[in-house]
C-alpha cells in the first residue's frame, strides 16, 4: 500500500499544472516539478542545485 501511495504522489507531483517545489530547512531546493521549472525558465536539474533565495524573494520583518 505504501509503495502505491508513493507512486501516486510521484505522478501527482510531476504532472500537476501548479508549480510546486520542496526545499530543505537550509533553503536548498530538494524537488521541483516541471511546471515550476518551466515558470522560471530553468530545467529541474538546474534548480535542484540552487538555493531557494537565489530564485525567490521573501519579505523580511
Image: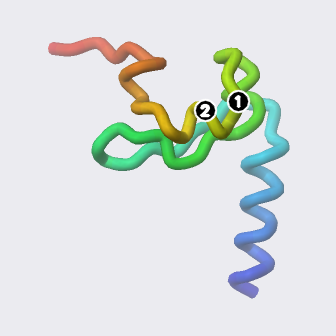
Please give the label number shown on residue 32: none
Q: What is the secondary structure assignment of the residue under circle 2?
A: helix
Callout 2 touching callout 1 (CB < 8 Å): yes
Drawn side of residue 58 relative to residue 52, left or right: left
Name the residue tied to disc 1.
Answer: 43
Residue name at image x 35 percent, y 38 percent: 27
Image quadrant where residue 60 sits: top left
Query: Which quadrant does the N terminus fall into?
Result: bottom right
Colouring scheme applied when the structure was drawn:
rainbow
Q: Nearer the viewer, residue 10 or 28?
A: 28
Vertical placement of residue 55 versus 30, above or below: above
Vertical placement of residue 26 versus 2, above or below: above
Label 1 Cα crowd, 10 Å radius (few <14 / some 14-19 / many 20+): some
Tell me the CA gap for discs 2 and 1: 5 Å
Tell me residue 32's x, y (percent): 63, 40
Name the residue tied to disc 2.
Answer: 46
Amino acid at each position: 500500500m505504501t509503495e502505491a501511495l508513493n507512486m501516486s504522489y510521484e505522478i501527482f507531483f510531476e504532472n500537476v499544472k501548479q508549480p510546486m517545489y520542496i526545499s530543505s530547512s537550509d533553503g536548498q531546493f530538494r524537488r521541483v516539478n516541471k511546471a515550476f521549472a518551466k515558470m522560471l525558465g530553468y530545467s529541474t536539474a538546474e534548480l535542484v542545485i540552487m538555493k531557494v533565495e537565489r530564485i525567490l524573494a521573501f519579505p523580511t520583518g
